[in-house]
Amino acid sequence: MRTLITLLLSVSVIAASALAGEKVQTTYRADLAATIDQKIEQDLGGLVEYYKDLHHHPELSLNEHESARKIAQHLKAAGYSVTANVGGTGVVGMLSNGPGPTVLIRADMDALPVVEETELPYRSKVTATGTDGRTVGVMHACGHDIHQACLIGTARVLAHTRKRWSGTVMIVAQPAEEIGAGARMMIEDGLFERFGRPDYCVALHASGIHPTGTIAYTPGWALANVDSVDITIYGQGGHGSRPHETIDPVVAAAQVIVALQTIVSRRVDPVEHAVITVGSVHAGSKHNIIPNEAKMQLTVRSYSDETRRILLDGIRDVTVNTCRAMGCTKDPKVVLTKDEFTPATFNDPDLAEAAAGVFRQVLGDEHVLRIKPVMGGEDFGRYAAHLSVPGFIFWIGSVERGLYEASKNPGGPSLPPIHSSKFAPDPEPTIRIGVRCMASLALSLLEPGQ
């Protein structure tokens, strides 16, 4: 039975779940608000230091060994049953606390091959060997260090309040998000067979365009399908002074690059979201040598399966026929790198709006922003899609308030975006709001305690 004070103080938001066909019920636990805030303030200093340590010691995808070890250590200390090495370096922490829903809360651990250019005293100086054998910088340029700190902070709040809720919390620390592999690897390693089927899957992501103290969310499609395509164009090399004796793959590649843009502008319905970007072009070794080959790397973004099919089929069609028209020595090689595919992330609309209602109770209406979908990618969507249960990822503002306000002025500073070498979240307020909102959302989905 709920206590009278819970009934009086709780604010319920009930909506139909389009994805699961059932009711999504969130109950904002106003009776726990003070307890949540007290626990966060008690832990905040340590969480910020934990964040700084993660930022100072980032690890690339598939190599998150120390990050995983530290998360496992923190979860065990909070009373969770912990299993390491799930899908590689993934960590799962379980807190079973009686009958009720199971809520999966996920954070990613991997960093990017970026040389950090901030002036932070805890900036990364880590280097690693890249896939091509060269030395690369390593940096948390996407906020995964913030995500890990918020994950541990949330896990502690839920353990601290366990007498006041019933259900199961599944904490998932995921590897290899940046290469689109981690969620798939954990699922293929039996995540849901070994640890149970969650009723809800939730996550957060640091935003490089919103100020601290704010939350942003998108119902429905929120993040895009991400495909990677590698193209090799074959020509016949020779001296740069005698192009008529060659078949120039560089010129053919230039024609292909321009022609690819007609796929979005002329083959895709204008109301659909679609992007084809050529991110890398490599050919030749010297000014006066026409090479035998030119190589390109593409990123391809979409939401619907049909638009994705049109884009990928169009890339092959346009590339092959353009190369034939240019007289290339043989058809180009067009390879879809399937291991790096990230499916679009769908935020269950009713869970998203119900969660936004909780956030408004926590932060106030003016600090909760409904925003348009973006064409960035995130493999978090695999979890909910795999099980056909409601899933929801939201953005936490991480830009220092003064910098954000200054950026709005004419001639003001630009905000370094995520994946930038100068991306630097304001850690204390970002972590505070991230934990407050994620813990409040999780508690709203769990059953009140007896």
Image (cartoon, rainbow, N blue to C red):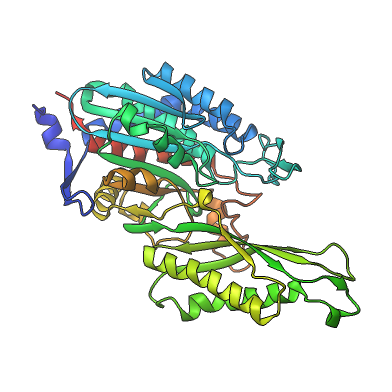
Q: Position of residue 128 (x, y in %)?
A: 71, 37
Q: Is residue 193 left or right of 303 when viewed as pictured?
A: left
Q: Position of residue 140 (x, y in %)?
A: 60, 41
Residue at point 46% right, 38% down? 185
Residue 62 in view, yes or no? yes
Image: 383 above or below 419: above
Image: 39 above or below 298: above
Which residue is at the front of the view, 184 or 111? 184
Task: Indicate the quadrant containing the N terminus: top left, top right, bottom left or bottom right.
Answer: top left
Which residue is at the front of the view, 30 or 293? 293
Q: Position of residue 352 (x, y in %)?
A: 29, 51
For residue 337, which quarter of the picture? bottom right
Q: Position of residue 197 (x, y in %)?
A: 27, 34
Residue at point 60% right, 72% down? 319
Task: Indicate the quadrant containing the C terminus: top left, top right, bottom left or bottom right.
Answer: top left
Residue at point 24% right, 22% down? 97
